[in-house]
Image: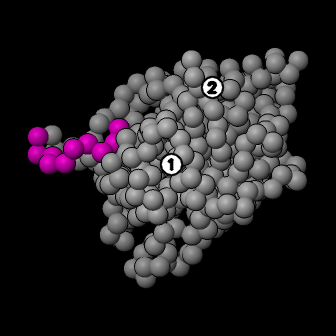
Amino acid sequence: MTKPKLILDVDTGSDDAVALALAMLGGEAELLGITTVNGNLELKLTTDNTLRVVDLCGMGDRVPVYPGCEYPLVSTLNPRSAQSMRPIPKREGTSAGKFGMHSDHLPLPATDLAPQKQAASVWMIETVMAAQPQTITLVALGPLTNVAAAMRVQPQFAQRLRRIVLMGGADETGNETAAAEFNIWADPEAAEILLQSGVPITMIPLDATHQAFLSEEQAEQIDAIGTPLARFIAQLLRDRIAGYAKRDPEMAAKKIAPLHDALALCYALHPECIRRSVETVCHVDLGGGAAYGRTVLDRRANMVQEKPNCTFALEPDREFFCDWLIGILQKAAEKNG
Ligand code: RIB
Ligand code: CA
């Protein structure tokens, strides 16, 4: 069976790091390249962290990393926008930053690996246009600036993709604000460009990722695998459990944390990891007020005029997801002796 061809767009970031490592070590996909974007941290840090993970996985000669956009498309230019005072979302200014979820540098050695010279969106366009139509899946795990820019520059880009799987959105409750999930909030206009593009999109929102949590016991199980990569992931998971404990009493009591981006990657490779989803019309609130960046699902049944523009995941198969994640780390350890 041929492996699915993937491009990963990331803002590494602790949960991005886990997704990246699983994509590289799982061997389930042909990873064409990685693109980085401003998001959890400023671009130079998300790029450096990405290169550190690539180095840890020993993939420096196989997986190129292309740095992308340093700023959201327009949101920081709008004086009415909640983001106008914050040209680049800074770690200390975002909710994840306040709870210590993404440190500037991942706890990995500095790397000599260098990013590619070509800009992320330009490389994405060249790669997708050169491939057979509808053969490449784009897995977007950060704000959607790079992808939206590619769509605007090359109008054929969207229709040449097989599909987009993105971690983002929230129906029930946001994380960055009461209404909005971080990846969509960080560049709402970019997200709306994707949702209007006509490309098949699956959104893996907080509604799904919060149910696909990992526990402290699982952190120990991962640690016990004993490879540098497993130890690193166990440490990230423990840090996230500590971070979530500060913001969510329920997660604090259970000592658990989600690894949002890893669930989105899992879905791209194993759609059965999502048990329940809805085909829906979804748009992003661009009004600049309290709901700015919110993903608004149209649930009015027969009154909806538009065709559904995305599949919105609602419930994961947590056991499948956890077994998949831990299984990859175990197999990688066995392979290396
Ligand atoms: O809301 C979760 C998303 O924002 C994830 O992609 C994570 O990396 C983050 O910062
Ligand atoms: Ca991310």
Quarter-wise, where is residue 287 in the image?
bottom left
- Measured as percent of width and height from the top left, residue 210 is found at 50, 38
Residue 163: in magenta span: no
Q: Residue at x 50, y 48 (%)?
A: 129
**Residue 93: image x %, image y %?**
60, 68
Q: Which mark is residue 28?
A: 2
Q: What's the residue type where badge 2 is placed?
A: Glu
Identify whether 238 is placed above or below 88: above
State yes or no: Cβ of the residue under disc 1 lies below 8 Å from any atom of ligand 2: no
From the image, tell me which residue sits under label 1.
Answer: 129
Determine if the magenta segment contains residue 307: yes
Whether residue 200 appears in this view of the structure is: yes
Q: Magenta stretch: dominant SS?
A: loop
Q: Of all residues shown, which one is farthest toward the bottom?
A: 79
Q: Residues within 10 Å of mark 1 (few under 14, many from 20)?
A: some
How packed is label 2: few (under 14 Cα within 10 Å), some, or many (20 or more)?
A: some
**Between residues 146 and 267, which one lies in front from this camera angle?**
146
Query: What is the spatial separation of the Cα atoms under label 1 and label 2, in whole angstroms?
Result: 23 Å
> Which structural element holds mark 1?
helix
What label sits on residue 145 in the rendered view? none
The amino acid on which the numbered mark 1 sits, given as a three-letter code, is Met
Task: Say if 123 sits above or below 61 in the image.
Answer: below
